[in-house]
Amino acid sequence: MSELERQIERYLEELVRGGASPHTVAAYAADLRQFLEFLSPPEMAPPEPGAIDRLILREWLAALYRMKLAAVTIRRKLAAVRGLFRFLLREGIVRVNVGRLVRTPKAPKTLPDVMSPEQVNTLIDGVAADKFERPFPVRDRAIFELLYGCGVRVSELAGLNLEDVDRTERWLRVRGKGKKERQVPLPGQAAGALERYLAQRPVTREERAVFLNHRERRLTDRGIRGIVKLYATLISGDPSIHPHSFRHAYATHLLADGADLRAIQELLGHARLSTTQKYTQVSLTGLMAVYDKAHPKA
């Protein structure tokens, strides 16, 4: 094993110890493995970490551009390399974080596609109708109701434990990015769907997760994505709908109905207000579409 490969393994272990999500660790592992392969031509060992300079990184970035990768993908790969060299700098293995010496590619500013309230209601009503002979229809409806009614991330929904649900005061305690906890109100529709599911949920002492799979184990992020995609395809004919689509709809619909932007920031668990502000642009785009369609002078 080369020194660079060994240090990459140490860095990934550090991420796990630091509480990084499994998704982040897996993504960084794949990106750094690709970085290592680029630096390891056939029958040649990769350079020592201290020998990697800005020129080498620029050649690597140029190779990524030639692969026609999206700017956001290149930004993530660069973030992984910067994280590695930040770790190596802290450990005294390198003298400078060379990842900071190359420019970050600019990502195009795109607005998320947002379902209308009618589209969301049609989808959730279709789940509630239970026409597809699914094994756990009550659970599936609760998943959809919480995704839209609470605006939680799929990882937060999968991570919910029974003790995180305040059924009396109707609050959820969710753990977001960086293990930051916040409370999210549980609205009536979602609370009712969750109550119906919990009344049917298998009683198992070994598993405290709210949502269980057919093995009576915690339903994973991937499992929830699969459920959402299945129903979206069957009901709406749109397999591109995913759990985060409901989070976008939650924020946009709250804003359109007059909710304060900072309140939405708190509900979503965004660290920066600028992240939440993209929904302002989405809302304005929707208003302009209504204006262009309805105003006689448009």
Image: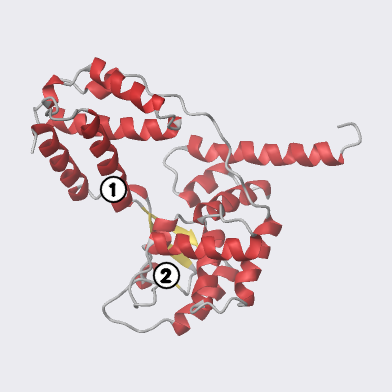
Image quadrant in which the C terminus is located = top right
Q: CA distance from mark 1 to mark 2?
A: 29 Å
Q: Mark 1 falls on what kind of element?
A: helix
Between 281 and 184, the one nearer to me in the picture: 281
Residue 148 image-quadrant placement: bottom right
In the displayed structure image, the side of residue 267 where residue 49 appears, left or right? left
What residue is at 61 percent from the left and 45 percent from the top? 113
Q: Identify residue type, mark 2.
A: Val
Q: Mark 2 falls on what kind of element?
A: strand
Between 127 and 117, the one nearer to me in the picture: 127
What residue is at 50 percent from the left and 56 percent from the top? 243
Please determine whether, in this image, residue 257 is positioned above or below residue 200: above
Spot occupied by residue 213 in the image (x, y as percentages of width and height): 39, 73
Spot occupied by residue 118 in the image (x, y as percentages of width and height): 71, 58
Q: Which residue is mark 2?
A: 165
Q: In the orientation shown, which residue stands out farthest toward the top?
A: 55
Disc tally is 2
> Crowding near pointer 1: few (<14 within 10 Å), some, many (20+)?
few
Q: Which residue is mark 1?
A: 26
In the displayed structure image, the side of residue 59 where residue 110 appears, left or right? right
Between 246 and 65, the one nearer to me in the picture: 65
Q: Identify residue type, mark 1.
A: Ala
Spot occupied by residue 285 in the image (x, y as percentages of width and height): 69, 37
What residue is at 12 percent from the left and 36 percent from the top? 7
Upstream in the sequence, badge 1 or badge 2? 1
Spot occupied by residue 122 in the image (x, y as percentages of width and height): 68, 64
Q: How is the image coloured?
A: secondary structure
* Residue 58 seen from this side: yes
Image quadrant in which the N terminus is located = top left
